[in-house]
Amino acid sequence: MAIVGSGGKATLMYRLAGEAADRGYAVITTSTTHLHPPTSTQTRGFYVTDEMPDWQAVVPRELETRRHVTVLGARPRPDKLKGLNADELGTLRAVCAPDLLLIKADGARARLFKAPGDHEPVVPEGTTRGVVVASLKSVGLRLNDRQVHRPERVARLSGLGPDAPVTPEVIAGVVSHPEAYRRAFPDSVPLSLYLSCAGDGESLDLARRIVETVPGSVFEGIYGGDIQRSEAVVARLA
């Protein structure tokens, strides 16, 4: 599964991984872009292949024991990890054979909203499902470089003017635009939309405006929740 978009990709990835591992599945979390080092609450094992010449022997054993491990390619700096390229992902799949491979396949430079560039997202071959993440906290952000990643792309896909506020309708237009995320996935791969930070009545009202605006044929399901809160429930909205 490839997770793309902005405003909660890693949080969703680790939450899904934890729930799957609790049910007995063997899960690997990784990235094709960059990722911050995971905490001990996010993963049960963490390995950097560039630092482990014997990782192909070690990681499969650790996965069998721990049920959830995170594997990245290199550590260019202490707070930033480099993801895996296509060949490395292929090797990881072959030697570990996980039940579930969760991939953060997009970057947003810590912005809560973005539209993908021509080279984004980095969805690897063999992906069988996709999730687009959009944060409801991005509603009201101004369309400029300080608050939005690739604002010129958002403007082109939505028609929003410079420094105008992002609305639920703008979010819906960008995430469902055929030149945004859908083009990065084969037509046979189903896409879901996850609206993060949907934890109260006001945010759920914003989520409903997005649901009403998104064309019905783009996503097989639209979900909302605030999984940073430990007991939050993710609900199907459409």
Image (cartoon, rainbow, N blue to C red):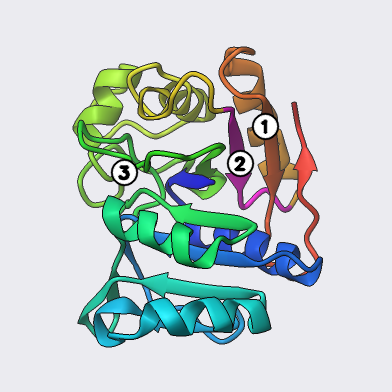
CB contact under 8 Å: marks 2 and 1: yes
**Which comes before the other along the chain, label 2 or label 3?**
3
Quarter of the image with the C terminus is: top right
For discs 2 and 3, the disc positioned in front in the rendered view: 3
Indicate the position of residue 63 as horizontal and vertical percent values.
Answer: 59, 77
Callout 1: helix, strand or loop? strand
What amino acid does circle 1 point to?
A: Ile
Indicate the position of residue 187 as horizontal and vertical percent values.
Answer: 48, 18
Marks 3/1: CA–CA distance = 22 Å
Neighbours of disc 3 within 10 Å: few (<14), some (14-19), many (20+): many
* Image: magenta residue range: 190-199
Look at the image and say whether residue 141 sits in the magenta stretch: no
Residue drawn at (38%, 49%), measured in percent from left and top? 105
Residue identified by numbered label 2: 194
Residue drawn at (57%, 18%), measured in percent from left and top? 214
Neighbours of disc 1 within 10 Å: few (<14), some (14-19), many (20+): many
Q: Residue 229's quadrant in the figure?
A: bottom right
Residue drawn at (41%, 18%), measured in percent from left and top? 177
Residue identified by numbered label 1: 222
Neighbours of disc 2 within 10 Å: few (<14), some (14-19), many (20+): many
CB contact under 8 Å: marks 3 and 1: no
- Asked whether residue 174 is in view, the answer is yes
- Asked whether residue 228 is in view, the answer is no
Indicate the position of residue 130 as horizontal and vertical percent values.
Answer: 53, 38
Q: Residue 143's quadrant in the figure?
A: top left
Q: In terms of depth relative to the viewer, which is nearer, 155 or 71?
A: 71
CB contact under 8 Å: marks 2 and 3: no
